[in-house]
């Protein structure tokens, strides 16, 4: 089983995310970088499938030089090899652009199964996985919380509002991960040592048959970043008794905040 | 050329989900902004009967794709129908809800159509010939303003964020012809179980803290069930062994950003706030009027949670019933 | 459960990713290259990254750096600023008196203001390029002994993936036995392994007790228009208020350029008043009119805390054991009157490396050959510098007015003073009973806006410390009942104050209304104050799962 994991390096969720002077990007100098947590579930699941049925796990990422750290971490967890599409023209991509790059890279390698995070916790796009599947013309199941590998097919439990749907797809296919799928393993110390010697290939867009010019006009462009509105302190609901307060609250949540 | 907004209205088991009305309503607003019209699209099996309801939210033209093959959501079948409808209508904007279905469908569709997509939007407007969207990124720590290009321009809207404003119009319901090829993904079964949503994925979270005083979370669970919410806990409650680690919200637990976060008996130390402050609306119930949570919430009630929360549950029940 | 531990052998193992071990590892590889030795060298660091747990003022005296990497500027050494002028103040409650004279060891003009976190990250890249295997996120959990338990043969790393009860979870990863011909310990002040070795091998016999300070530091982003940059001096030291005259300590403010400043406050842990709270002192310091003026309009970007080994020359332990060398702050390498240790730490690491290469070359790795490290230290400027201030911290620890007499005589006698060595007390023995001091009416109420004035828990947040909750507590309280039966009535539970991370709380049970000790180990900043100051030595600090703890970037 040839498994490819799509992985993105992102700022850790504890990082102080501050907006840069240009108003449209974040300051990256003081950020701690990690593997996007949903991608970490993908790495773990790939390793478990490989352990069960054999094969190999390849990590595929798009990013700058720094992203090799995240790939090395995945290699230290046990993945076999890494491929990084590292090209200045790829940096400003939108979700579709990234998906196009990943799909082009995938077309150059063997795969039976592709696993991706449901979304990266920086851009929060929820687009790349299904879009890669579309470009490869393979089925895709998103938000998978459990999978069972069969003979040439995979059965996935997909989370949805109020429950799960069980779906089955033939290989090759792509699925994206949901929290609860597994508990990712640690990179072991011998794993870290071995990871240094595992193959990690850097590719440019030209290497995967794409032209930088194709990515100069993203369809989605970030024009500004802003901090979310600050809460200025709660509106205290005053009333004589708990029942009236509760009724008033529910009324406000329904009519003013419109969250229920 | 008349500019059309296509709003895909999500239904489940023959009833529209609330986000469907929000989508229609938002689509109507955008159609007005771009000086065009709104078309709704409903997919499912046996949905012809309910389709007309969308007119109450402003859908003038309602397309219905009614087919046994669409009874359960599968990506490919839904994608085919939508792509065909879009090819036919050439809409400027395509909208749907950022539900598990909408997010899945929008992503695949955007790739098929090579269309710009903004996901999980909290604000949308049509300006200078393009869709301008606001969407939370970095777990809600930042709001991004994005501008879309090309045609169509797609967006998924965050549930419970846009108004589902009634605007009764005379809607025409049209059945569209279908030729759905079987999906490579086979639907096996659906397992509906209430309550066990992971707190990070839930739309609403109700949490109990040290003020619970013990492991009896009945009042919290009752409210959560009524709201369709997940149950969370503060570190104190988890430390005391009242709740499992998987329920812990905070810096060292899980980071959540639901539409509604109800903090009961939680004082609101920064470590807890770090895990939930990007929630859209925060409600605090605490008997200590000086609890820091009250400075960081939207609505606060000072009182004994064991008295207040059951009343909230009851009020929600009445609201849902009425 | 019996866990099997895989083992890996290296020639040299460095424990700790601070300036001592990194400089040592770099020197080792430089020498190995020169001499054509092919060495397998490893360095482990408990932080998720190099620099994640590192915090210091910091003014760098570049002497050792120049020796190690003469082309450090070309290599892009991260220097925040160069000291343009020094100022030394004595604070009263309302006023700041600028002293006309700055003691020679504290004159820093031309030295560098650095972020030690950034600096060590830079060093680690150099070490890695020279072939050092750097393993971040791996903590040393125990020392491995061999040869009839007399020889240190390496370190076992900590297990990962244990649940609260200590049982393995599905992702359990057993620790690894890292074996080495020589292990170099550079864990920083009060290293958890160093403490066990010291006790077992009697490294501290005949030494003055090692004494410490707890420092709390922030990096503050100032507004574009600010008083500090107008002030024009980027190296300011301040003593006096809010500390009483009996307790040694003081504050610092360093300019880092780009509108950023480093501000910190240190208190000697030999303090006597059990009500003292270093964090509250830090807040009071920041609110002093003089300081408040300089930091006005700022926003705290990062906060952290760490203890400093402040005793100096006579507290340096035996620097070698069979199979091991001890470097940096873990070995009390610090110049108390200069308030500096980074250059000494680096130099000690470099001297250890030279000793190791000699021993490996001669294939004579014995206690005798390793003991040459001590001689190297004594023959170097490390000794000269440390010897001059050998009784300084001990003089400061004396009462009033005796301390001033000691200091004056030391000034005149090249550090010898009235008694040489001047004896002092271990920090855990100095607390006076709570009833001997006026208890503060209530917890000091410094108003915190959590932007410029941040409370303890917000400070913990700004340290970016993180620990998985579902694991055994890494803070071991040997007898929790003692905390309630003896410590609470005698000292009023000083742990609830000396810990800058609010790890310790005394809470009253809901059911029985009895007080008990509640631990919040996930707040821990890895400063080690509790391990040092607890009056009953009832706390042992151990490493949590590797990769946890603070996530410093700027400190």
Image (cartoon, coloured by chain):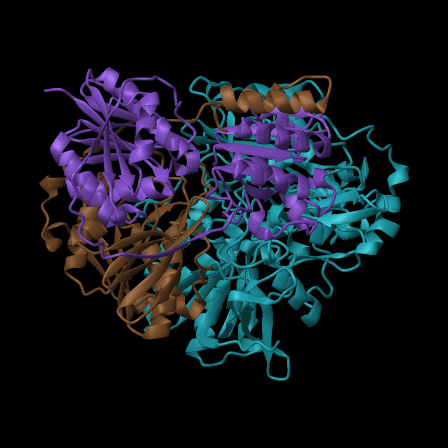
Which residue appears at 50% of the width and 68% of the height? C173
Q: Residue furthest right?
A: C435
Quarter occupied by residue C374? bottom right
Residue C295 showing in the rendered view? no
Q: Is residue C107 shown left or right of residue B86?
A: right
Chain the render paints purple: B
Q: Nearer the viewer, residue A64 or B256?
A: B256
Q: Colour of chain A?
A: brown
In this view, the residue in front, B109 or A102, is B109
For residue C440, which quarter of the picture?
A: top right
Q: Position of residue C103 (x, y in %)?
A: 61, 35
The tint of chain C in the picture is cyan
Q: Residue at x 88, y 43 (%)?
A: C433
Towards the viewer: C246 or C120: C120
x and y percent of residue C462 in the render?
Answer: 54, 37
Residue B57 on image: x %, y %: 34, 22
Residue at image point 80% right, 48% down: C516
């Amino acid at each position: 089983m040839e498994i490819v994991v799509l992985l993105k390096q992102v700022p850790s969720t504890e990082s102080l995310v501050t907006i840069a002077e240009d108003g449209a990007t974040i300051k990256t100098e003081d950020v701690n970088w990690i593997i996007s947590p949903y991608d970490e579930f993908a790495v773990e699941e790939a390793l478990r499938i490989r352990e069960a049925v054999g094969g190999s796990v390849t990590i595929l990422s798009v990013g700058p030089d720094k992203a090799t750290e995240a790939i090395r971490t995945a290699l230290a967890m046990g993945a076999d090899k890494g491929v990084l599409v590292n090209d200045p023209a790829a940096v400003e991509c939108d979700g579709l652009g990234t998906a196009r790059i990943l799909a082009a890279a995938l077309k150059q390698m063997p795969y039976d199964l592709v696993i991706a995070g449901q979304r990266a916790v920086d851009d929060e796009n929820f687009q790349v996985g299904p879009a890669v599947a579309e470009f490869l013309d393979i089925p895709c199941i998103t938000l998978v919380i459990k999978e069972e590998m069969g003979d040439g097919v995979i059965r996935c439990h997909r989370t949805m509002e109020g429950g799960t749907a069980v779906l089955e797809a033939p290989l090759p296919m792509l699925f994206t991960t949901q929290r609860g799928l597994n508990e990712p393993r640690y990179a072991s110390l011998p794993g870290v040592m071995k990871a240094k010697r595992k193959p990690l290939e850097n590719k440019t867009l030209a290497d995967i048959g794409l032209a930088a010019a194709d990515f100069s006009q993203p369809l989605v462009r970030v024009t500004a970043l802003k901090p979310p509105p600050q809460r200025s302190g709660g509106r205290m609901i005053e009333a004589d008794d708990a029942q009236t307060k509760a009724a008033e609250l529910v009324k406000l949540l329904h009519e003013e905040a419109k969250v229920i | 050329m008349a500019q059309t907004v296509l709003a895909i209205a999500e239904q489940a088991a023959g009833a529209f989900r609330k986000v469907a009305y929000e989508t229609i309503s938002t689509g109507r607003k955008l159609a007005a902004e771009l000086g065009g019209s709104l078309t709704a699209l409903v997919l499912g099996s046996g949905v012809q009967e309910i389709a007309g309801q969308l007119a109450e939210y402003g859908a003038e033209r309602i397309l219905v794709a009614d087919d046994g093959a669409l009874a359960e959501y599968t990506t490919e079948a839904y994608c085919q129908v939508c792509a065909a409808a879009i090819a036919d209508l050439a809409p400027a904007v395509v909208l749907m809800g950022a539900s598990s279905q909408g997010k899945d469908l929008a992503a695949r569709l955007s790739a098929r159509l090579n269309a710009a997509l903004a996901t999980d939007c909290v604000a949308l407007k049509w300006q200078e010939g393009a869709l301008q969207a606001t969407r939370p990124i970095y777990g809600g720590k930042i709001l991004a303003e994005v501008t879309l290009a090309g045609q169509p321009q797609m967006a998924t809207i965050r549930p419970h964020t846009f108004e589902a404003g009634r605007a009764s119009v005379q809607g025409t319901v049209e059945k569209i012809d279908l030729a759905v090829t079987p999906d490579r993904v086979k639907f096996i079964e659906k397992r509906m179980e209430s309550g066990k949503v992971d707190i990070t994925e839930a739309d609403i979270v109700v949490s109990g803290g040290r003020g619970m005083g013990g492991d009896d979370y009945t009042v919290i669970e009752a409210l959560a069930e009524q709201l369709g919410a997940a149950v969370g806990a503060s570190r104190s409650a988890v430390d005391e062994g009242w709740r499992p680690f998987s329920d812990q919200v905070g810096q060292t637990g899980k980071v959540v950003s639901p539409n509604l976060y109800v903090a009961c008996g939680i004082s609101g130390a920064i470590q807890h706030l770090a895990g939930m402050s990007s929630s859209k609306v925060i409600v605090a119930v605490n008997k200590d009027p000086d609890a820091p949570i009250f400075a960081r919430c939207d609505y606060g009630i000072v009182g004994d949670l064991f008295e207040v929360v059951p009343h909230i549950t009851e009020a929600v029940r009445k609201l849902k019933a009425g | 459960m019996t866990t099997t531990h895989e083992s890996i052998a290296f020639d040299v193992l460095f424990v700790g990713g601070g300036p001592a071990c990194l400089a040592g590892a770099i020197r080792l590889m430089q020498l190995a290259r020169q001499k054509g030795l092919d060495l397998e060298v490893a360095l482990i660091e408990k932080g998720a990254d190099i620099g994640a747990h590192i915090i210091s003022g910091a003014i760098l005296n570049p002497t050792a750096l120049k020796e190690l990497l003469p082309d450090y500027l070309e290599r892009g050494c991260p220097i925040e600023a160069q000291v343009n002028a020094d100022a030394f103040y004595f604070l009263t409650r309302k006023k700041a008196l600028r002293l006309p004279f700055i003691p020679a060891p504290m004159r820093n003009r031309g030295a560098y203001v650095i972020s030690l976190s950034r600096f060590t990250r830079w060093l680690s890249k150099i070490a890695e390029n020279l072939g050092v295997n750097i393993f971040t996120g791996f903590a040393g959990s125990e020392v491995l002994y061999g040869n009839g338990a007399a020889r240190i043969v390496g370190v076992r790393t900590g297990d990962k993936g244990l649940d609260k009860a200590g049982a393995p979870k599905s992702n359990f990863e057993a620790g690894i036995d890292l074996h080495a011909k020589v292990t170099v310990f550079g864990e920083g002040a009060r290293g958890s392994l160093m403490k066990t070795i010291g006790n077992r091998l009697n490294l501290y016999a005949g030494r003055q007790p090692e004494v410490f300070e707890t420092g709390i530091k922030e990096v503050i982003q100032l507004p574009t228009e600010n008083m500090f940059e107008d002030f024009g001096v980027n190296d300011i030291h301040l003593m006096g208020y809010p500390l009483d005259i009996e307790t040694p300590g003081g504050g610092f403010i360093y300019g880092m350029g780009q509108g950023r400043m480093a501000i910190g406050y240190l208190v000697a842990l030999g303090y006597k008043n059990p009500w003292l709270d270093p964090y509250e002192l830090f807040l009071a310091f920041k609110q002093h009119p003089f300081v408040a003026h300089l930091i006005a309009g700022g926003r705290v970007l990062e906060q952290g805390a760490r203890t400093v080994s402040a005793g100096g020359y006579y507290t340096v332990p035996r620097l070698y054991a069979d199979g091991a060398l001890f470097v940096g702050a873990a070995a009390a390498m610090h110049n108390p009157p200069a308030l500096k240790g980074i250059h000494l730490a680096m130099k000690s690491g470099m001297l250890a490396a030279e000793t190791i290469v000699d021993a490996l070359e001669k294939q004579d790795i014995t206690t005798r050959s390793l003991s040459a490290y001590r001689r190297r230290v004594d023959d170097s400027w490390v000794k000269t510098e440390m010897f001059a201030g050998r009784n300084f911290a001990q003089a400061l620890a004396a009462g009033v007015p005796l301390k001033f007499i000691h200091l004056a005589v030391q000034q005149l006698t090249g550090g010898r003073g009235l008694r040489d060595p001047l004896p002092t007390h271990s920090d855990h023995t100095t607390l006076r009973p709570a009833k001997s001091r006026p208890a503060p009416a209530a917890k000091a109420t410094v108003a915190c806006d959590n932007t410029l004035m941040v409370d303890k828990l917000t400070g913990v947040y700004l340290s970016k410390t993180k620990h998985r909750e579902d694991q055994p507590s890494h803070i071991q309280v040997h007898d929790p009942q003692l905390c309630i039966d003896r410590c609470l009535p005698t000292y009023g539970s000083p742990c609830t104050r000396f810990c800058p991370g609010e790890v310790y709380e005394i809470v009253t049970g809901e059911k029985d209304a009895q007080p008990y000790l509640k631990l919040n180990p996930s707040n821990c900043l890895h400063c080690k104050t509790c391990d040092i100051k607890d009056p009953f030595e009832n706390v042992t600090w151990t490493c949590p799962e590797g990769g946890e703890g603070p996530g410093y970037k700027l400190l």
